[in-house]
Image (cartoon, rainbow, N blue to C red):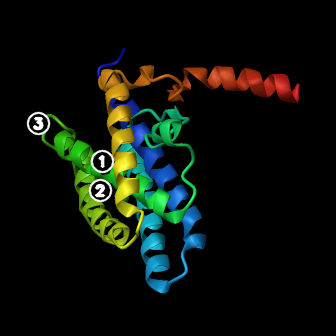
Amino acid sequence: VPAHRNLYWKLNWYRHSELEGALLLGKVVRAAADQELILALTRHCAEEAHHAWLWADTLHQMRLPFVRIFRSYQSFYLEHAGMPLGLAEVLALTHVFERRVHWRFTQELAQPRLPAPVRRTFRVLLKDERRHLDWVGRWLATQPEGADLLRRFQAIDEQVYLALAPYTDRIWDIPGLGEESGSVAHADAIHQALVG
Ligand SMILES: [Fe+2]
Ligand SMILES: [Fe+2]
């Protein structure tokens, strides 16, 4: 096992979680009726997509391997919660997830031996995260079901955190998370079987 294996698995997982966050937010824009909300959601979606790109670029700059990731961090919430249906649910899930992200990234930044490109990316993301936490928190406070939804997702977030904590230093062992490119050969074999 290469010493930096956990690092590149983690950064690939972050890359993918950002991207799925963007996709989820992009999908709920259609549920928004007023200009201010459409503007905020679209910007939020764009910034999450940008975060995914920043991780992809960081991995590339550092010549770290790309890992195919099958599921985001947030997808583990959905095992407990089911698929969030409406705008308020999506934003409550997003808010709880972003609180977790903010806490986690702050911890990561405190590590002394973090490579400089990774440190730079964490800093950019944390700055955006504070703005995301601010607007979503304020919006949820105006929703009658906001507080209940936050409590519900907060409890789920704690369960997910505890379930994943044992994998902190061996992220590749999280069942079904991803596939390292050793399996390119495997993908080729599947392709051959399909195409002949
Ligand atoms: Fe993000
Ligand atoms: Fe965010």
Nearer to us of marks 1 and 2 is 1
Q: Give neighbour class at mark 3: few <14, some 14-19, many 20+ (Cα, 10 Å).
A: few
Nearer to us of marks 1 and 3 is 1
Q: Is residue 4 visible?
A: no
Amino acid carrying mark 1 in the image: Val
Where residue 126 appears, x then y in whole percent? Answer: 25, 56
- What residue does disc 1 label? 101
Q: Nearer the viewer, residue 116 or 14?
A: 14
Disc 1 secondary structure class = helix
Marked residue nearer the N-terminal end (1 or 2) = 1
Disc 1 Cβ-to-ligand 1 distance below 8 Å = yes
Amino acid carrying mark 2 in the image: Leu
Label drawn at residue 112: 3
Disc 3 secondary structure class = loop
Compute the Cα span from label 2 to label 3.
Answer: 19 Å
Contact flag, marks 1 and 2 (Cβ < 8 Å): yes
- What residue does disc 2 label? 125
In the image, is 191 to the left or to the right of 3? right
Indicate whether 189 appears above or below 68: above
Disc 2 Cβ-to-ligand 1 distance below 8 Å = yes
For the point 58% across and 63% down, the residue is: 27
Indicate whether 93 appears above or below 72: below
For the point 39% across and 47% down, the residue is: 153
Amino acid carrying mark 3 in the image: Pro
For the point 39% across and 43% down, the residue is: 14
Q: Check the picture and name the quadrant holding the C terminus.
A: top right
